[in-house]
Image: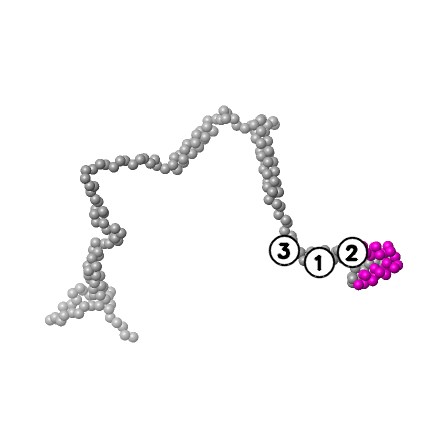
Amino acid sequence: MWQPGGEVLTSCSANHDEDALQAANETDPKSVQRFGAELYRQQEAETNRGQARRNKSGDADVPARQQLHERRARFDDARARQAANSGALDSDDDETVGGGGKRRRVEGEEDDFYQAAKQLGKKKKEGRTAAKAGPTIHAPLPDELADGARKVTTQIEKNRGLTAQRRKDIKNPRKKHRMAFDKAQKRRKGQVPSMRQGGPSYGGEATGIKSKVSKSRRFS
């Protein structure tokens, strides 16, 4: 609340402020003016804080991007300054710089080394150009004139089309199955001994006895 002749307390409510303003009006008009100005500033600050609280977002700290025409004008100014600086440097190089400065090489003052290097570079460039150009294409020769119909080739005569290429020995299905059967028979004879016909007496193994081959079974 407000006290005449004292300081303004900012923690008072709106009703207390109105009562204090009416009491001050009855006592001192100047105090009313000071109190009214302070009350207006306080309400304005409260309004600004509420507005800032409502408008607060994650993009508040991001600087605003300039417009396109402003960025383009700034870029053009920078390019103009760069071109002006490069032109000034070129004009300085054309003239002799005092105090031991260097001077640009003139076309007529090149020595043999620079001329040889330039010729070598020119030859390499011509070689690369010729390699990229490719072979020279000539016009096709005219067809030979022949009497009567032309002879056909073996490929045209057989007219096989897209027939798959097969081996000559297995081209016939019957022969292919016969070869597979013979191969299976040989494999079976090595796995299981064939039946022997009885003879007068045992004369030993016809193929010999192999000491490293064992076909017996062990009973545990």
Residue topped by disc 2: 40
Residue at image location 59% in from the left, 31% down from the top: 88
Q: Is residue 82 left or right of residue 41?
A: left
Residue topped by disc 3: 58
Label 3 or label 1, whichever comes before in sequence order: 1
Q: Residue furthest right?
A: 27
Mark 3 vs mark 1: give the one in front.
Answer: 1
Q: Is residue 186 magenta?
A: no
Residue 149: x percent and y percent?
Answer: 20, 41
Amino acid bearing label 1: Gly
Q: How crowded is mark 2: few (under 14 residues within 10 Å), some or many (20 or more)?
A: few
In the displayed structure, 146 sits above or below 220; it is above
Amino acid bearing label 2: Tyr
Residue topped by disc 1: 50
- Circle 3: element type: loop
Q: Residue 203 or 125: which is nearer the viewer? A: 125
Q: Residue 209 or 92: which is nearer the viewer? A: 92
The CA span between labels 3 and 2 is 31 Å
- Circle 1: element type: helix
Which region is colored magenta?
Answer: 15-37
Q: How crowded is mark 3: few (under 14 residues within 10 Å), some or many (20 or more)?
A: few
Residue at image location 88% in from the left, 59% down from the top: 27
